[in-house]
């Protein structure tokens, strides 16, 4: 059975580009999102996120009639669920558990419009077993249909997990070029999923089962988290020993089998900062290295804040006529990584907010990818204003606008090695 109509549930940083890629291949695509603003924006041929080249693709897809956005699911041949999977609030020191409520809500939303022969793919990064749980929710809602957990290859509805593996800022290209891991709940589920993705994917579609596909994405991001934790821990050690960590890493990386990553102010985004907890929450006694890496990276923002406090103290020692209220602090970058507008789990945003709470003076932020923010205790300014007025400058994100700058004054805390 061919796929004439594709529904993408969740039109965020992954869902919208995915919907646009199907639409660019002349598939009828129905995007679903709970945000009326997102739906209205897309239906105007515009986008509500920052991603290079995506605006042109969406504009063309909408104007040609291949893409529309709605708030309530409509019938389709394939449904891709790309909704958030955060973790639940927990007490300090406890291991956070994954929040599957968005997946559950999406499952129950599409259930009424499912028909025999449909394919449902979970793209959301998920803890092991989430795809099977989604299948249970769907089966509970549609007792008139059969599902792979009970009917295997003969099921009315095919279900699979296919995690996204793209880099913000390069999503359009990587959706096409990257390999995809396809984890079906049966062989038939995998085969139909490969058929669907081959609509636009030029990379290899590698087939496995749903649990292994879920674990593959968690493993990829946990591996990165461990590597970043090593670099972040190294930066703290080098600071204590009065060693330039950037020079040290460059020297160590001259070894043919060593590739140490660059340290930073912490780890952000909805993948690397979240996914390792899905493994730790399932296997807390076994995931010792993964758990430790999370604690190292989660602790790095507090270390940066302590460096800011030290800079304030040094400034006051050198300027005894001043008080802390006279000090202006500028934080450069709020996104979780360079050259994007995504603030999810951003250590830079956390650090800036905390500085604005503890500092009695003025706090400003420079974020070239964002025009405005909801109410905060700091103000957005342009680069030139911060350069002229700030006494303490804290580089948190290495946006291209911050590179190759000749800083003329102020105390500098560079967490990315851009100005050193």
Image (spheres, grey):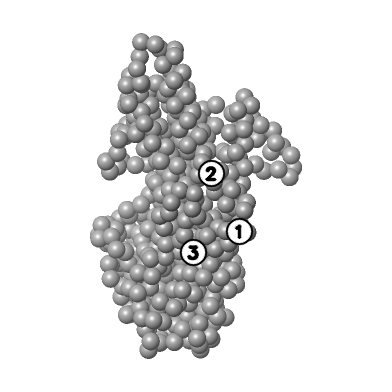
- Residue 42 or residue 155, whichever sits in front: 155
- Residue 205 or residue 111, whichever sits in front: 111
Instruction: Classify residue 188 as left or right of residue 139.
Output: right
Question: Label 3, on which residue?
Answer: 126
Q: Measured along the vertical axis of the image, is residue 144 above or below residue 271?
A: below
Question: Label 2, on which residue?
Answer: 297
Q: Measured along the vertical axis of the image, is residue 35 above or below residue 52?
A: below
Q: CA separation, marks 1 and 3? A: 20 Å
First in residue order: circle 1 vs circle 3: 3
Mark whose residue sits in front, 1 or 3: 1
Instruction: Specify few, some or many for label 2: CA neighbours under 10 Å numbering under 14, 14-19, or 20 or more.
Output: many
Residue placed furthest toward the top: 321
Instruction: Classify residue 248 as left or right of residue 410.
Output: right
Q: Quadrant of the C terminus?
A: top right
User: In this orientation, does residue 287 appear?
Assistant: yes
Question: Label 1, on which residue?
Answer: 285
- Residue 333 or residue 97, whichever sits in front: 97
Image coordinates of residue 299 in percent, x first then y, are 51, 41
Residues under numbered marks 1 and 2 in contact, where contact means CB atoms less than 8 Å apart: no
Image coordinates of residue 255 in percent, x first then y, are 74, 39
Residues under numbered marks 1 and 3 in contact, where contact means CB atoms less than 8 Å apart: no
User: In this orientation, does residue 383 appear?
Assistant: no
First in residue order: circle 1 vs circle 2: 1
Image coordinates of residue 369 in percent, x first then y, are 37, 41
Residue name at image x 34 percent, y 67 percent: 31
Instruction: Specify few, some or many for label 1: CA neighbours under 10 Å numbering under 14, 14-19, or 20 or more.
Output: few
* Mark 1 residue element: loop
* Mark 3 residue element: loop
Instruction: Specify few, some or many for label 3: CA neighbours under 10 Å numbering under 14, 14-19, or 20 or more.
Output: many
Q: CA separation, marks 3 and 2? A: 21 Å
Residue name at image x 33 percent, y 19 percent: 326
Q: CA separation, marks 1 and 2? A: 20 Å
């Amino acid at each position: 059975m061919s796929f004439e109509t594709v529904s993408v549930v969740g039109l965020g940083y992954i869902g919208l580009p995915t919907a646009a890629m199907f639409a660019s291949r002349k598939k009828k695509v129905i995007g679903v999102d709970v945000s009326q603003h997102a739906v209205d924006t897309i239906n105007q041929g515009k986008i509500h996120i920052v991603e290079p080249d995506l605006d042109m693709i969406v504009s063309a897809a909408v104007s040609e009639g291949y893409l529309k956005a709605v708030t309530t699911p409509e019938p389709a041949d394939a449904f891709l669920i790309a909704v958030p999977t955060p973790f639940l609030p927990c007490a300090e020191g406890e291991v956070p558990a994954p929040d599957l409520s968005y997946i559950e809500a999406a499952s129950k939303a599409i259930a009424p419009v499912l028909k025999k022969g449909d394919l449902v793919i979970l793209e959301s990064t998920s803890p092991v077993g989430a795809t099977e749980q989604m299948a249970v929710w769907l089966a509970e809602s549609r007792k008139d249909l059969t599902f792979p957990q009970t009917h295997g290859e003969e099921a009315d509805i095919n279900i699979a997990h296919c995690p996204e593996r793209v880099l913000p800022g390069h999503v359009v290209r990587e959706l096409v070029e990257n390999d995809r891991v396809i984890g079906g709940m049966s062989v038939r589920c995998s085969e139909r999923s490969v058929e669907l993705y081959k609509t636009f994917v030029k990379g290899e579609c590698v087939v496995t089962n749903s649990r292994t596909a879920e674990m593959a994405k968690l493993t990829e991001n946990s591996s990165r988290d461990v590597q970043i934790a090593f670099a972040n821990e190294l930066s703290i050690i080098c600071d204590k020993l009065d060693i330039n960590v950037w020079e040290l890493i460059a020297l160590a990386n001259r070894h043919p089998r060593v590739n140490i990553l660059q340290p930073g102010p912490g780890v952000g985004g909805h993948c690397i900062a979240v996914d390792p907890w899905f493994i730790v929450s399932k296997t807390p006694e076994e995931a010792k290295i993964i758990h430790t890496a999370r604690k190292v990276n989660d602790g790095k923002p507090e270390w940066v804040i302590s460096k800011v406090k030290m800079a304030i103290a040094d400034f006051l020692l050198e300027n005894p006529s001043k008080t802390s209220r006279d000090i202006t602090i500028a934080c450069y970058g709020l996104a979780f990584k360079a050259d994007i507008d995504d603030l999810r789990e951003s250590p830079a945003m956390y650090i800036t907010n905390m500085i604005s709470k503890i500092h009695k003076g003025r706090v400003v932020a420079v974020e070239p990818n964002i025009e405005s923010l909801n109410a905060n205790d700091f103000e957005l300014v342009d680069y030139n204003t911060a350069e002229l007025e700030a006494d303490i400058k804290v580089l948190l994100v290495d946006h291209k606008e911050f590179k190759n700058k000749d800083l003329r004054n102020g105390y500098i805390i560079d967490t990315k090695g851009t100005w050193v």
